[in-house]
Image: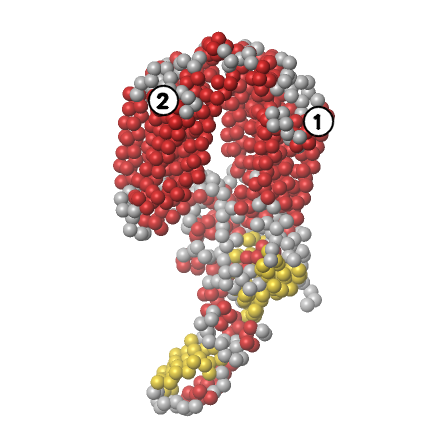
């Protein structure tokens, strides 16, 4: 263990901002549920009605967890936040463990350090303790924030400590995965699969096969029943399982060489397939994972919105402010709600569009462009390949969102016609989403360093959408968001002029980006 | 210089990055059918020159001709005729080496299948590994196989062997030699002098963005000293007044000195007068040439200036 303390200190110092970020995110996740529920319903009768409608929504239960005491703030916080909270703690643990163990070994830095007088287990143990401490911090801050809301102390503590224990369990699985795989990427894949399995087991279990929920660590966490008859013993299950996983990781570590994993790395094809041809083939190969991931992601979020079905009125409550918030001033609450949902999904799609437009920058920064451009490939074609994938991928992501939203609504209500009318409008935001990606392309074309600014327009669009009127932002500033110019379908009727106008501006900016790129030095 | 243009012709090339001048009136001519060594310490401007030559960077001043054309304007067209291996080969983490070789080959407009298979075998490269799991040397092999297996007239190699072990280095040298013997041209940037001595027909040395020396190895040796270690019958006298003698040490009947290569003949004839028992003489290496240009450890004497300002 020689050196473990020094490693621990180094890790904690290196990670301090990241840890605070995760902790802040987790606190926000739990605390914001309390605030939003509190603000939504003015009377208990309203709250009871909403709770009754949620209790019977299988889609909600699959997504969040067993429906208990939903007519109380604590019950709502537990329901809405605990499953996602467990995933957040799991992801944090995975990244912390990965970056200090497998990633270090993969880069060879680990070997450099091991040359010094360092105990065999020191780096691994320091990574373990870092993650354990981080999860402790996460749980305690969540508990404290809820207690200060104010919610009951014991239940707040139960919800927080349960989160910590969940994080410890996933720390253990991450440590095991780090012994099994040879690359950080496949380690993250393995951890993600474990988390997905835990989530899926409890989702199916909560809908009607309770035994499955008892096979999932997230199920154990939720079985602690905070704010609805708190009990501590399921937490013990988490603690024992975490200890077992950590023990297993140390045992596995003894059976392998430093730098290798117990599972052999899978070889790939020795020859390129026919698809890997030209800049489009390469760009697609590099970005297809992200296209599919984003499309599935927004599809699930769309499902969640759609699964609200026609119960919008009950969920939103009677107060005028919450109606205004959801309906964006539209006359019909249902149409207004889904118009807002479409807009939100389109804003999420911007996340894909901008990161995809910035992918060429990653390629350039990582020094992989020279080899390509030293062939007969022109700069224009290289960038066009990535641009094509961005455009096609954006369409795919928006279609995914529309399909999710429509399918969710149709499943719950059995009205496919209405589902189409409410979900199809997501697609009309294509020009605005493309415009934000074109801004990213223009910035990148001018200078890779300037390209980080590409996220600002999205921030502006989000701020304008949620707070534009509240903050009384000047009209010219609001007009900078392309989303402001498009009709809020289905609350308003579709308008061609702004659709084509925004599309034209997007095209112009994109071409300008291409031209700028052709004229500058490659870094 | 009438007739066919040289593959590479650079005159008075200037490139600034912000306030730093990376290239300061650099000249370089590479002739058809030769391996041209491009030498200089890190930061001298080798990679910058190559990247201008490939159209990645725009020249601020000076004349750059690749196959007689403008490498910035006609980049893609010219690139059909050359293959490039960067000094730091970065591969896509999720593409296998075999896929990268094929991809680059296709982008260049075709690959010689037989040579591809032969090179993979000679370099002992596993083409099924993913980019992220290759070592530096193996990443370099991927780029080398892709370059050497394509049908081109010019190889531009930027420190291509810095990660290879000696056995692989000799495989590399063998293939580059064969490439030249078919009448093709190579620009080989390096700071591994043994490699340059082994391979190159001509050498250009640059320092701080300027060409300080250019010529065949023979031309350059002309400007260097040979070190001589002699054992004589009788103690020598009068050696210290000979022209071109440096670092003379006389210890009884033993003499050790360096002599400017043009004066070697004269110095040896003087030694003979004292009866020669044994003689070791070392030809000047590029190493020494290099040190004279960059190192402070070689004492400078009046007359050395000639080397810096030819």
Q: Is residue A81 above or below residue B11?
A: above
Q: Position of residue A286 (x, y in %)?
A: 53, 38
Q: Nearer the viewer's eye, disc 1 or disc 2?
A: 2
Q: Is residue A282 left or right of residue A58?
A: right
Q: Quadrant of residue A242?
A: top left
Q: Is residue A405 above or below residue B112?
A: above
Query: Cα distance, mark 1 to mark 2?
Result: 53 Å
Q: Earlier in the sequence, mark 1 or mark 2?
A: 2
Quadrant the N terminus of chain A occupies: top left
Q: Is residue B254 left or right of residue B260?
A: left
- Residue toward you, A472 or B11: A472
Identify the chain of the residue marked 1, using the numbered disc in the image.
Answer: A
Rate crowding at label 2 as few (under 14), some (14 to 19) or many (20 or more) other CA atoms within 10 Å: some
Image point (58%, 31%), residue name: A350
Q: Are marks 1 and 2 in contact (CB under 8 Å)?
A: no
Image point (34%, 19%), residue name: A224
Image point (50%, 54%), residue name: B87
Q: Is residue B212 left or right of residue A120?
A: right
Report if residue A16 is visible in the image.
yes
Q: Position of residue A471 (x, y in %)?
A: 61, 28
In what element is the residue under mark 2?
helix
Image point (39%, 37%), residue name: A96
Coloration of the structure image? secondary structure
In what element is the residue under mark 1?
helix
Count of numbered tags: 2
Rate crowding at label 1 as few (under 14), some (14 to 19) or many (20 or more) other CA atoms within 10 Å: some
Question: Which numbered tag is attached to residue A498?
Answer: 1
Q: Is residue B132 above or below residue B167?
A: above
Q: Position of residue A25 (x, y in %)?
A: 45, 30
Residue that badge 2 annotates = A153
């Amino acid at each position: 263990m020689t050196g473990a303390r020094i490693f621990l200190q180094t890790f904690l110092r290196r990670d301090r901002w990241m840890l605070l970020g995760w902790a802040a995110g987790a606190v926000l996740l739990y605390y914001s549920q309390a605030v939003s529920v509190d603000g939504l319903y003015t009377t208990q009768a309203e709250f009871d009605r909403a709770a009754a409608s949620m209790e019977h929504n299988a889609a909600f239960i699959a997504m969040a967890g067993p429906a208990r005491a939903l007519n109380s703030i604590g019950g709502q916080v537990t329901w809405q936040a605990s499953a996602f909270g467990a995933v957040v703690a799991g992801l944090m643990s995975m990244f912390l463990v990965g970056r200090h163990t497998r990633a270090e070994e993969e880069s060879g830095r680990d070997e450099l350090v091991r040359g010094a007088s360092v105990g065999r287990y020191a780096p691994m143990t320091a990574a373990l303790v870092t993650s354990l401490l981080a999860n402790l911090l996460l749980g305690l801050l969540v508990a404290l924030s809820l207690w200060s809301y104010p919610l009951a102390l014991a239940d707040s503590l139960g919800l927080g400590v349960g989160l910590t224990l969940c994080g410890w369990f996933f720390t253990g699985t991450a440590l095991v995965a780090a012994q099994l795989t040879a690359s950080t990427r496949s380690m993250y894949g393995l951890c993600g699969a474990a988390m997905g399995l835990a989530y899926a087991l409890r989702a199916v279990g909560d809908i009607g096969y309770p035994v499955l929920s008892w096979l999932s660590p997230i199920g154990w966490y939720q079985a602690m029943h905070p704010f609805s008859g708190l009990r501590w013993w399921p937490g013990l299950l988490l603690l024992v399982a975490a200890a077992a996983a950590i023990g297993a990781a140390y045992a596995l570590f003894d059976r392998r060489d430093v730098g290798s994993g117990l599972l052999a790395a899978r070889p790939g094809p020795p020859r390129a397939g026919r698809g890997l041809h030209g800049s489009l083939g390469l760009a697609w190969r590099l970005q297809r994972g992200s296209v599919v991931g984003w499309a599935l992601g927004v599809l699930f979020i769309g499902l969640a919105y759609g699964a609200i079905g026609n119960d919008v009125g009950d969920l939103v409550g009677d107060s005028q402010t919450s109606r205004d918030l959801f309906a964006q001033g539209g006359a019909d609450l249902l149409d207004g709600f889904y118009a807002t949902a479409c807009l939100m999904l389109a804003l999420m799609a911007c996340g894909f569009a901008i990161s995809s437009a910035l992918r060429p920058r990653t390629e350039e920064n990582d020094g992989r462009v020279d080899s390509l451009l030293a062939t007969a490939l022109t700069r224009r074609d290289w960038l066009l390949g990535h641009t094509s994938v961005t455009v096609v991928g954006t369409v795919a992501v928006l279609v995914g969102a529309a399909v999710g939203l429509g399918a969710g609504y149709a499943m719950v209500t059995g009205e496919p016609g209405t589902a189409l009318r409410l979900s199809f409008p997501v697609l009309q935001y294509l020009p605005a989403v493309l415009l934000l990606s074109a801004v990213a392309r223009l910035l990148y074309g001018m200078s890779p360093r300037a390209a980080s600014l590409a996220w600002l327009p999205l921030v502006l669009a989000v701020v304008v959408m949620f707070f534009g009127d509240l903050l009384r932002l000047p009209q010219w500033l609001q007009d900078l968001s392309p989303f402001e110019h498009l009709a809020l379908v289905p609350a308003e009727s579709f308008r061609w002029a702004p659709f084509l106008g925004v599309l034209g501006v997007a095209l112009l900016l994109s071409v300008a980006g291409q031209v700028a790129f052709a004229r500058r030095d490659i870094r | 210089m009438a007739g066919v243009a040289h593959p590479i012709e650079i005159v008075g090339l200037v490139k600034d990055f912000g306030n730093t001048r990376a290239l300061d009136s650099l000249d370089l001519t590479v002739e058809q059918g030769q391996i041209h060594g491009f030498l200089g310490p890190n930061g001298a401007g080798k990679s910058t020159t190559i990247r201008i030559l490939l159209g990645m960077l725009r020249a601020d001043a000076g004349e750059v001709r690749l196959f007689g054309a403008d490498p910035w304007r006609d980049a893609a067209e010219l690139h059909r005729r050359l293959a490039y291996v960067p000094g730091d080969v970065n591969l896509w983490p999720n593409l296998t080496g075999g896929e990268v070789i094929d991809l680059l080959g296709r982008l260049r407009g075709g690959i010689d299948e037989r040579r591809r298979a032969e090179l993979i075998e000679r370099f002992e490269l596993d083409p099924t590994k993913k980019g992220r799991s290759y070592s530096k040397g193996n990443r370099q092999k991927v780029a080398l196989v892709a370059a050497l297996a394509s049908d081109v007239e010019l190889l531009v190699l930027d420190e291509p062997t810095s990660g290879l072990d000696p056995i692989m280095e000799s495989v590399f040298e063998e293939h580059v030699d064969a490439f030249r013997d078919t009448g093709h041209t190579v620009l080989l940037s390096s700071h591994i002098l043994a490699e340059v001595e082994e391979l190159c027909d001509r050498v250009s040395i640059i320092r701080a963005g300027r060409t300080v020396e250019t010529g065949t190895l023979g031309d350059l040796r002309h400007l260097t000293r040979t070190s001589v270690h002699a054992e004589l019958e009788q103690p020598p006298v009068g050696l210290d007044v000979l022209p071109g003698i440096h670092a003379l040490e006389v210890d009884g009947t033993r003499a050790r000195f360096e002599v400017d290569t043009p004066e070697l003949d004269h110095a040896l004839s003087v030694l003979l007068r004292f009866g020669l028992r044994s003689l070791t003489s070392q030809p000047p290496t590029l190493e020494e040439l290099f040190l004279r240009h960059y190192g402070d450890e070689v004492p400078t004497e009046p007359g050395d200036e000639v080397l810096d300002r030819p």
